Image (cartoon, coloured by chain):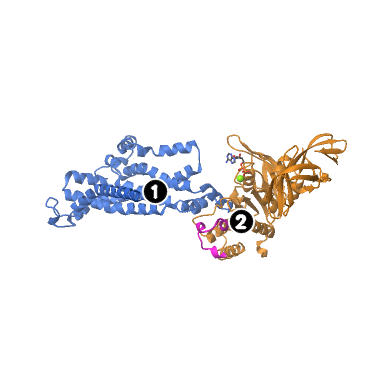
Amino acid sequence: MQSLSNRRGWGFWLQLGFTLLVCALLTVPMVMSMLAGLTANYFVGLKSGLTLRWVEEVWRVYSGTILLSLRIAFACLACTLALGVPAAYALARRPGRIARLVEELLMMPVAIPGLATALALIVTYGGVGDLRSSWLFILIGHVLFTLPFMVRAVLAVMGSIDLTTLEEGAASLGAGFLRRFFTVVLPNCRSGILAGSLMVLTLSVGEFNLTWLLHTPLTKTLPVGLADSYASLRIEIGSAYTLVFFLMIVPSLILMQALAKRGRPSV
Amino acid sequence: MPDSFHLDAVPIRLERCGKTFAGGARALEPLDLTIRGGETIVFLGPSGCGKTTTLRIIAGLENPDPGGRVLFGEEDVTALPIERRNVGMVFQSYALFPNMTVAENVAYGLKVRKIARADRARRVEEMLDLMHLGEFAGRRIDQLSGGQRQRVALARALVVRPRVLLLDEPLTALDAKLRDSLRLEIDRLLRGLGITAVYVTHDQGEAMALGDRIVVMAKGRVAQVGTPREIYYQPADGFVADFIGTMNRLGGMSRGGTLSIGAATLPWTGPDGAVELLVRPEDLALAGEADGHLAGTVAAAVFLGDRTRLVVEPADGPALTVDAAGRSELGRGDRVWLRVDPARLLAVP
Ligand SMILES: Nc1ncnc2c1ncn2[C@@H]1O[C@H](COP(=O)(O)OP(=O)(O)O)[C@@H](O)[C@H]1O
Ligand SMILES: [Mg+2]
């Protein structure tokens, strides 16, 4: 008995130590980077004092990229909701080989490197009107990239409830298709739609690969601006920029965690 | 039960309703059936025999194969989807909406029908009271027991005053004790409402207790239609006889107006030759050596309280099930004699 609990104790401390180490590996650089964005002079260190000067500088130079990123993220969310939820519904209601095949196809943009997708987009649509220089071009790329995540998240919830029977119940009470969809299907998939939405927002705000190829000097998103600032400006500015990025993305990450913890609604 | 709860009694007619699923599987042979207005009809049969398919054709959730027709009264509803047939449906898995409270679930059909708010609230309340659900009105579905859920499902289906009520194994998901009490409640409800009801089950006890008539089904076709007594005492064939209650089989030989079973000879009318005879346990009686027809040995005795069920092995032929008095002291290995009443013997093709 004694030796058993001893062994367990060893394992426990070992695991805890390892976990803390991994956490430190992940968080220390981020904390350092964010601190760098708040120090007056990085090379002198913290004793040079804390300041919001760099954050203000970032806002002055890059507020356009931040707003564009937000605009694209919410437009992307609207598109993935309008396309992804009905698509997930259609897939959930149609069991069979073709539906499963479509599901796999939908994952393709995730499996293919973003650069390749972007190149394909440029080759195919680059010549269409003013599209190439419009922010809508980036939006198209983001929708392609994030749509599978929305479909998967909604599909997962739809698969966990007996959607067919719920709808048959509603139909037996006289509800036509649209009413069933809006009063029974959508409310019962809420958790999946929420999870998918947060995922889409986060992915869109942080997307770099695709966006870097698709952007023009007038359509720069936050991550692209970030790369620029790292390459060409003071390290404090790049770091302050990172801080702004975290401030935008962390709330939605926390919400996602909270949602996942609450789990699916019991049926 | 208040008068407002009395519903129209619409007859249902199925004309040559068959069902072949994609892939060519024949789930239902073309079926003709008339269900009288206000009648409770029970579809009974083993799993996979086509009961649910038939119910779904009546509901409008499946289309019958071309040529089949479904009529509610004089109206041909074959082409109408379920939402336009005004049927009430109760599912084995309840199919209650988890995103709504009990009261909202019950109100759903009334909202669809655009009943004014005040009227709606009153009817929901009346229906919840009728189903003893008043105190649960504000609960979420996942806060209810299985029996309560099925009562909500019944309330939700009935509050819209449907033309017919369709129930697909509504008690199967419940435990035995709940099943009995809810069955009594459903029985009371169906009698009180006077609604035409179609009830699907694989449980013969439920079928006997609830059905005005029972449709026994086997492998996609109707084996027999009749009242519970007809089905029990005059089964149309061996399948029905075996499926309903317990049935004994006896081998006999008919010759010139007599029937020989074992050593006994009984008066009998029927063509000469070997016959297979069916007899219910309660129609076999224990007798003495002098007046018994068949001798056998008790292989098992199960005390059931009001009676003792004996399994008797005769000298030849399959074991027989016989009911003895509850206080009977007979046990394994005892030698017994059985008496057969020829009037109770059934010769089944
Ligand atoms: N949607 C379907 N597609 C193909 N076959 C089906 C479908 N629904 C039922 N069946 C088949 O039809 C037969 C009858 O099914 P069902 O009516 O559900 O039987 P029961 O309700 O008596 O158990 C079964 O063999 C079943 O496998
Ligand atoms: Mg069934």
Identity of the residue drawn at 41% across and 54% down: A262
Residue that mark 2 sits on: B177
* Subunit ID for the residue under disc 1: A
Magenta segment: B134-149
Image: B204 above or below A111: below
**Magenta stretch: includes residue B228:** no
Q: Few, some or many C-alpha atoms within 10 Å of disc 1 (few <14, some 14-19, many ≥20)?
A: many
| Residue B286 on image: x %, y % | 78, 48
Residue extending furthest toward the right: B256
Mark 2 and mark 1, same subunit? no
Vertical order, B119 against A107 (above or below): below
Residue B194 quadrant: bottom right
**Taking the image as four quarters, which one is ligand 2 found in?**
top right
Q: Residue at x 42, y 37 (%)?
A: A104
Q: Position of residue B226 (x, y in %)?
A: 74, 47
Residue B195 higher or lower than A119, as above or below: below
Q: Locate residue B12, reporting x and y percent.
A: 69, 49
Q: Is residue B195 visible?
A: yes
Tell me the residue that label 1 is attached to.
Answer: A196
Front label number (2 vs 1): 2
Amino acid type, label 1 = Gly
- Between residues B101 and B181, which one lies in front from this camera angle? B181
Residue toward you, A54 or B207: B207
Palette colour of chain B: orange
Q: Answer few, some or many: residues within 10 Å of disc 2's Cα (few below 14, many 20 plus, some between 14 and 19).
A: few
| Residue B261, placed above or below residue B3 | above
**Subunit ID for the residue under disc 2:** B
Q: Residue at x 39, y 47 (%)?
A: A79
Q: Which chain is blue?
A: A
